[in-house]
Image (spheres, rainbow, N blue to C red):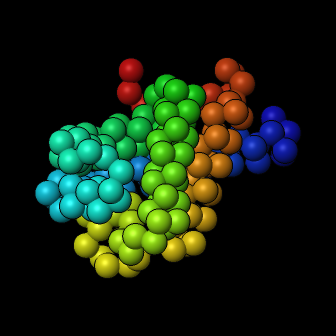
């Protein structure tokens, strides 16, 4: 394996692990406090009220599964594509709230109780995560260089 191939293999694995770590870090606090996360979801004023609790309960588990799949190397292309789609939804929600002048906390890495209002920081950060997910999806390793999944 050439030096360039080795670099791209390491970069790919690090990107996959970083993205998986981001999803786990985002999911865990929300899983412990779904009631507070429901308030954060409701503050965006996007979902009808009857869907807020469902989203607050389901979303952290979806993020958790994406994180596990990416870290463990299971169905990486599917997990990275699904992660990219989820990041696009998150980004759209943040931009929408910011554009409408709604002064809320993101709720991205927790329940939204941190009180830090949405700003360009969250938009840029989530754009980077979206780009990372798309890169992992579009830059798969050749079959001979793919990591062996940790599970199954």
Image quarter hosting the N terminus: top right
**Residue 71 shows up from this direction:** no
**Residue 113 shows up from this direction:** yes
Image side of residue 105 versus residue 39, left or right? right
In this view, the residue in front, 70 or 36, is 36
- The x and y percentages for residue 127 are 61, 56
- The x and y percentages for residue 96 are 49, 58
Residue found at x 69% / y 22%: 144
Residue found at x 84% / y 45%: 3
Q: Please give the count of numbered marks on the rendered protein.
A: 0
In this view, the residue in front, 152 or 130, is 130
User: Farthest front residue?
Assistant: 100
Residue found at x 42% / y 34%: 69
Image side of residue 104 versus residue 130, left or right? left
Residue found at x 35% / y 59%: 44
User: Eyeballing the image, is 102 above or below 51?
Assistant: below
- The x and y percentages for residue 137 are 63, 34
User: Eyeballing the image, is 102 above or below 35?
Assistant: below
Image quarter hosting the C terminus: top left
In this view, the residue in front, 93 or 143, is 93
Image side of residue 6 versus residue 81, left or right? right
- The x and y percentages for residue 33 are 16, 59
């Amino acid at each position: 394996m050439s030096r360039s191939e080795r670099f791209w293999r390491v970069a790919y694995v690090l990107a996959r692990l970083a993205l998986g770590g981001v999803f786990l870090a985002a999911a865990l606090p929300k899983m412990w406090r779904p009631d507070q996360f429901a308030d954060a979801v409701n503050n965006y004023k996007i979902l009808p009220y009857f869907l807020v609790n469902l989203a607050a309960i389901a979303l952290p588990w979806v993020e958790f599964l994406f994180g596990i799949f990416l870290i463990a190397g299971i169905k990486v292309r599917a997990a990275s594509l699904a992660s990219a789609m989820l990041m696009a939804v998150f980004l759209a929600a943040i931009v929408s709230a910011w554009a409408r002048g709604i002064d809320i906390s993101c709720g991205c890495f927790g329940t939204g109780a941190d009180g830090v209002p949405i700003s360009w920081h969250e938009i840029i950060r989530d754009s980077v995560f979206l780009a990372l997910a798309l890169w992992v999806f579009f830059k798969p390793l050749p079959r001979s260089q793919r990591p062996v999944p940790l599970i199954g």
